[in-house]
Image: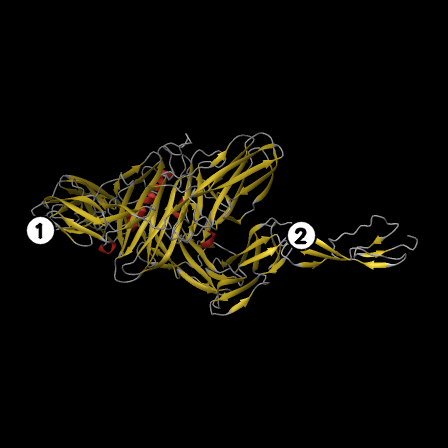
Amino acid sequence: MKKIRKLLILLVVCLLFVNLSSGFAYYGNQNVSNEFIEIAVNDTGRFTIGTTGGDIENLQDDNKKLLYGHPSPNTSYTTVRINGTDYYFSGNVQSPVSNGFYKNIITEGTFSGIKVKQILSIVKNNTTQLKDTVEVRYIVSNTSSVAKNTGIRIMMDTMLGNNDSAPFRIPGIGEVTTETEFVGEEIPPYWQAFDNLNNPTVIAHGSLLNVPNKPDKVQFTNWGRTYNSPWNFYIMPGSPNGDSAVNIYWNEKALEPGETREYVTYYGLSNFISEQNPPVSLSIAGPSEINFDGDVFMPNPMTLTSYIQNISDVQAENLQLELKLPEGVTLVTGEAVTEIGDLTPNQEKMYSWDIKIEDLKDNDEFIIETVLTGSNIEEKSVSKTIHINDISNPVLEDIQIIPNEVTIFKGQKRSINVLGYYSNQSIKDLTSAESGTTYSIDNGQVASVNDEGVIDVPINSSGGSVQLTVSNGELSATATIIVEENIEDTPNEIIVLPGEISLEKDQYYQLEVFAYYENGTRENITFKENIQYSSLDESVTKVNNEGLITTFGSIPGETRINIEYMGLSKDVIVKVLGEPVLSQIEVSHQYIELDKGESEQLFVNAVLSNGERLDITDDDKITYQSYDNNRVHVTNAGFIQVLPDAPLGEVGIRIAYEGKTKNITIKVINSGPTLNDIEVTPEKIELERGKTAQIGVTALMSNGETKEVTADEGTVYKSYDLNRAVVSEDGSIQVPINAPLGDVGIRVTHGGKSKTVTVTILSGPTLNSLEVTPEKIELERGKTAQIGVTALMSNGETKEVTADEGTVYKSYDLNRAVVSEDGSIQVPINA
């Protein structure tokens, strides 16, 4: 049932959103694969992913789905948002071009002056170090003369093996089976999907943060709810995901004329380095590679996750997990030693750490180790090698012409694209002459090419085949240009859009008809002289010789419109409705900014199929729902109230009426000065064991003012290793007397802004010797004397310790002399 439902929804969306007036080369579905993974893209640009051989160590994940429908794409799609308008990357695009050598599929479309190139490539996985993941890349260029706000949302309909309700795991969070959202700094570095959490046979891995342009929001949610919301989708926290999906957002941001921006994410196979011998399994997951650009490491910090599961039938007791790091790598979050406690049979626990590379610039790799111990298990350990990939000087290794064979009619122009492949696995668009790319054609009588890769075939071209050569630096590539007469061929197929139409009385509708030819081209034939339209029942609807359907004076009912062209035929179903029905609902506001404590009244109209509008604001059948009642309340009459202590940010309001819904956005703002950042001093502290230090925190406000917030109740302090340092609510740091030497992070958070202070634990000067004065004393019976004790330290300093609690005195004959705790000697009268 779900498959049918998904296909029906897909057809509706295509009819509503895809502009079908422009032609494109028609190549059909494209697939590329290797021994691990496969990509499939249909002729509209939608894609799916599945395994071929899968994980080489897993015999159960061969030929399995990673996205729903594989290898027939239809339910995952990408939204291009331009100046607040949503465009589906689907349909109004050139058909995909695949390349088996480069293992990629490229699809291109233009939306409102924004050129979007989708490149799906099989690349090396930074987790497995194998080419078993798919890079999903969008190269977005502003070809217009004005700046435009541009954003991207990628929606992937996850399906692992046969499980269309694939659950997730998030590092630092654990299992995610209900609708969950991460924004900004909360976004995890990666996510995993499973066919089964308890006994997985298919595991997928998505990388989010190892890219220059990081996403702004990620949602793990229900496919059925998000499919019909191409952009403004609000999760319902706690609601089961069920049919699961992932949304990855890059918010709208100004793209200047001529500017290009890239959006990248990764999705592919996942595996664990594990030790599976009973009674307890120990696994570790995370990147196996980190990039170094000559200055900084990326990502840094990086996240590692360990899974511990009792795979026996007896309880594992007193388990302890230790993370061992090499010199030059420090622990930022998590505990170096974690007391797990007991694990019952089949119970599993997950622990995550953020580690940071401080100084490994001369290394090619480093090794981290996890060690598990317990009172009734043998010690076991798992090591992970992390490779350092030097990307400081990426070298252009190859160039590719897209497509590498082009058929052009005389009198036409056609643009090609050039991609550059670099040693750091990056891909760049090198089409423009500004990139150093040059073009030449071996026969100028047939065709010419300009500096931007546009091929021009004159009407008087001699025709035939010529070779296009593209060069950049010392690299070159060639493509074949075939010039043909523009003679009308017999089409293979005609397609009419839409395939079914519902109309009211006294309306009209324009059909669009396309012919697909043997040479791979598509033509709009709607107004061709030799196309014929006919209605099977003109009492229901009429159609003229240009495909214009009219229902003036019609009776309600259903009939077919038949279209014939060059021996081919298609039918379209037309339904003429009776009484007007609800077409949609309109809401007075789509976006409202409100201060804390402010309110606003919504007004809602029902729009009928005949164009009539009815006020339904307080109708009994209308419902209003706030997606976050901690911020905004809404009454059943559409009255919005922002709570006085509401957190800042956006909230969705859902309005529903007789099956029609609308979502609007309420942004809770603070019209006063807002927090730009916090300043923490000092940023680094060196403390000896047993010593204390004070952190100072200052809020930097948007109006330029500063505010002391060290002891503010909104300022939160956290020590990442309580064995090394404890921090109080007012920012006072205490190092225990027996603290291990090394570094510990103190995280300071205020108003959503965070900073980390590094505390280095020092041992302090050691005691070399003691000096006691006087060394000899002569005392009469009943008399007293005072000893003085000085500590001589390793750094040359001296310290008076006569009455120190660590100084201990002992008399070897209490009948002759008694000594007090402060070094006072007393001789008894009868000594």
x, y percentage for residue 279?
Answer: 56, 31
Colour mapping: secondary structure
- Badge 2: how crowded within 10 Å, few (<14), some, or many (20+)? few
How many callouts does the rendering have? 2
Of residues 384 and 766, the one nearer the viewer is 766
Residue 241: quadrant of the picture: top left
For marks 1 and 2 on the same chain, the one whose residue lies earlier in the sequence: 1
Q: Are marks 1 and 2 in contact (CB under 8 Å)?
A: no
Can you tell which mark lies on residue 753?
A: none
Q: Amino acid at mark 1?
A: Ile
Q: CA distance from mark 1 to mark 2?
A: 98 Å
**SS for dot 2:** strand
Residue linked to disc 1: 459
User: Residue at the spot x=20%, y=46% of the render?
Assistant: 513
**SS for dot 1:** loop
Taking the image as shown, residue 719 lies to the left or right of residue 148, namely right
- Badge 1: how crowded within 10 Å, few (<14), some, or many (20+)? some
x, y percentage for residue 129?
Answer: 39, 39
Residue linked to disc 2: 768
Q: Quadrant of the N terminus?
A: top left
Residue 587: quadrant of the picture: bottom left
Taking the image as shown, residue 423 lies to the left or right of residue 534, namely right
Taking the image as shown, residue 507 lies to the left or right of residue 761, namely left
Residue 349 versus residue 801 in the image, above or below: above
Q: Amino acid at mark 2?
A: Asn
Residue 819 versus residue 73 in the image, above or below: below
x, y percentage for residue 325?
Answer: 52, 44
User: Residue at the spot x=31%, y=54% of the render?
Assistant: 609
x, y percentage for residue 176?
Answer: 48, 44
Q: Is residue 320 visible?
A: yes
Of residues 423 and 537, the one nearer the viewer is 423
